[in-house]
Amino acid sequence: MPKKISAPVLVLGAMPSETTLIRAAIQSPKEGKLAIYPYTSGKIGKNKIITAVTGVGVTNGAMTAAIFIQHFKPKAVIVSGTGSRFNPKIQCGDTLISKKTIHHAAGSLTADGMVYRKVRGPLPDMMTHYAYAPDKKLFEAAKQASKSYAPEAITIDGESYTPRVYPGIVSASDLFGVSEEKIVDMRAKLNPDLMEMESAAIAQVCDHLGTPHIVFRAGSNRTQSNPGTSYRKYGQAAAACAARWTIHFLKSVAV
């Protein structure tokens, strides 16, 4: 009988900084390329891993997820990376296990802000939602794994502390920064903890293609209208925090 090949876990980050530590943790790494996307494969813990960089934004995230899912048939998809801190209680480096990932630009933009709504999917009776929950087993496994996780202390703006890992709500769209009016509207209607650009699209792809997924995002800069300089200041530290947690999860859980 031919040997059964186990399906990999696909780990996606939007930028190289979000996958650097993950690639470094892979045992017996091998490099490959699918379409235009380089990837690294190997093992972390008991899990066969493939990790790749999607590029920034909704289309990049969705396209990469769809291509890799179709080709490799992964048993699960993990998104590891950063997001701006929408919730003021979140510190830089705190990593959220997303309990819901929301398209915060899906619907109608009215004089009273966004009206969020479902739209038609690819099949006649299939509606595309604006919010996606993670796989229940992965979510529970992540919460359990967080109990044994000992995060590294970090120093941000002269303050040293140990970042946390806990469940929260993540929102995403192609908006890198948003106005104060948009922040007020999102807070009133969605109350997210972090805001970023890829996870909701990846979650939607996973939902439509029947692939379990979970999102891990660490807080970087505060959510603001022009976060360019601020993100460059905090993004690297946040990316490392999310990656270290993702590695711990993969070592602790046989996905």
Image (tube, grey):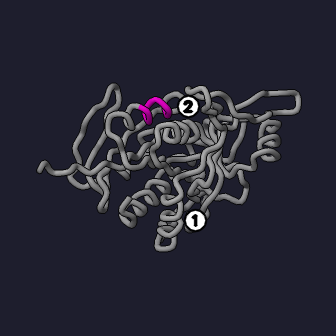
Q: Which quadrant of the structure image shows residue 32?
A: top left
Q: Disc 1 residue type?
A: Arg
For the point 53% across and 66% down, the residue is 143
Tell me the residue that label 2 is attached to.
58
Does the magenta run of residues contain 47?
Answer: no
Residue found at the far left of this picture: 1
Cα separation between marks 1 and 2: 27 Å
Secondary structure beneath dot 1 equals loop
Secondary structure beneath dot 2 equals helix
Dot placed on the residue nearer the N-terminal end, 1 or 2:
2
For residue 21, above or below residue 230: below
For the point 80% across and 34% down, the residue is 115
Does the magenta run of residues contain 62?
Answer: yes
Tell me the residue that label 1 is attached to.
164
Q: Residue 65 carries which label?
A: none
Is residue 152 left or right of 73 when viewed as pictured? right
Q: Which of 238 and 212 is in front in this view?
A: 212
Crowd tier of the residue under label 2, counting other residues whose Cα lies within 10 Å: few below 14, some 14–19, many 20 or above: many
Q: How many labels does the image show?
A: 2
Q: Position of residue 10 (x, y in %)?
A: 38, 45
Q: Where is residue 107 in the image (x, y as percent from the top left)?
A: 73, 30
Q: Disc 2 residue type?
A: Val
Q: Where is residue 152 in the image (x, y as percent from the top left)?
A: 47, 66
Q: Give the range drawn in magenta.
A: 61-66
* Magenta stretch, overall SS: helix
